[in-house]
Structures are given as structure tokens and as C-alpha cells.
Amino acid sequence: MSFYNEETAEAFEEFRSEHDPKDDRVFQTTKHPVNRKFRKVSEETGMKVTVQMLRGWFASEMSRLGVDGEYIDTYCGWTPTRVFEKHYFDYSPERLKEIYDEIELRVLD
């Protein structure tokens, strides 16, 4: 689960400028080019960057900003498994967007 905010909109517009207009897919790639890009960024910055590291950073930042662990799991793609979580937490897109907007998490600042 993710949300499209102002920061994402700016990054996406830049990304979209490289799209093939004949291809309807939002992300016109496969796993291999993505992995190559992560390797290239790692080489250029001198520090290893992986999807797992980014997920870890995201989860840590959400926690630091006071978001409940159950919601963090949902943002990371893990569905609730405990009865309490399934039946007593509101996981609607509206509630998740509300939480995300409240913490004002920025990635590129």
C-alpha cells in the first residue's frame, strides 16, 4: 500500500517522461533492469542500496513518527493475521491515507 502525494507526483512525472507511449503499463520494466539500477546507484553512491534496505528505512521512519506497527506492516504489504488486527483495526485506503498524510513522511528532503 502506498500513496500518491506531492513528492511522489513530482518524481513520477520525471519518471514518466521516459515512458514508451505504446505501452500501457505504469512501470514498464522487469526485475532485472530494476536490480541493475540498484547496483548502479550503489556503485555511484559508494553504499549498497537494496529494496529491503528501503523497506527497512520506511518502516523505521514510520515507527519513529509514531505509526502503530500493525499499520506499518500493512504499508509494507503484510496483511494482518491476528484476530484482533483483522477485526478491530481500520485498514481502509481512506484510513491508511489519513495516517500517511498526518505524519508527512518525506523521502527526498
Image (cartoon, rainbow, N blue to C red):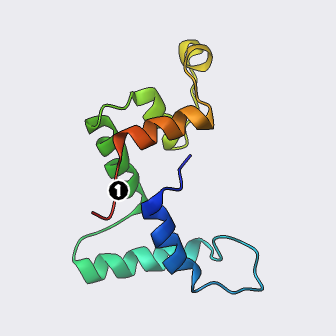
Quadrant occupied by the C terminus: bottom left
| Residue 21 image-quadrant placement | bottom right
Q: Residue at x 53, y 51 (%)?
A: 3
Left or right: where 19 falls relative to 23? left
Tell me residue 37's x, y (percent).
44, 79
Residue labelled with disc 1: 53
* Residue 55 position (above or below residue 49): above
On the image, which quarter does residue 82 sit in? top right
Is 65 situated above or below 56? above
Residue 16 horizontal/vertical position (percent): 58, 79
Q: Position of residue 49 (x, y in %)?
A: 33, 67
Q: How many marks?
A: 1
User: In the rendered image, is residue 33 in sight?
Assistant: no
Name the residue type under label 1: Met
Q: Is residue 47 above or below residue 67?
A: below
Residue 15 visible in the displayed image: yes
Q: Kindly indicate the quadrant of the structure image that contains residue 106.
A: bottom left
Left or right: residue 37 versus residue 63 is: right
Decide which of 83, 108 is in the foreground and name it: 108
Looking at the image, which residue is at 46% across and 71% down?
11
Coordinates of residue 53 in the picture (x, y in percent): 35, 56
Which sits in the foreground, 87 or 44? 87
The residue depicted at 34 percent of the width and 59 percent of the height is 107
- Disc 1: CA contacts within 10 A as few (<14), some (14-19) or many (>=20): few
Quick check: 30 left or right of 107? right
Dot 1 falls on a residue whose secondary structure is helix
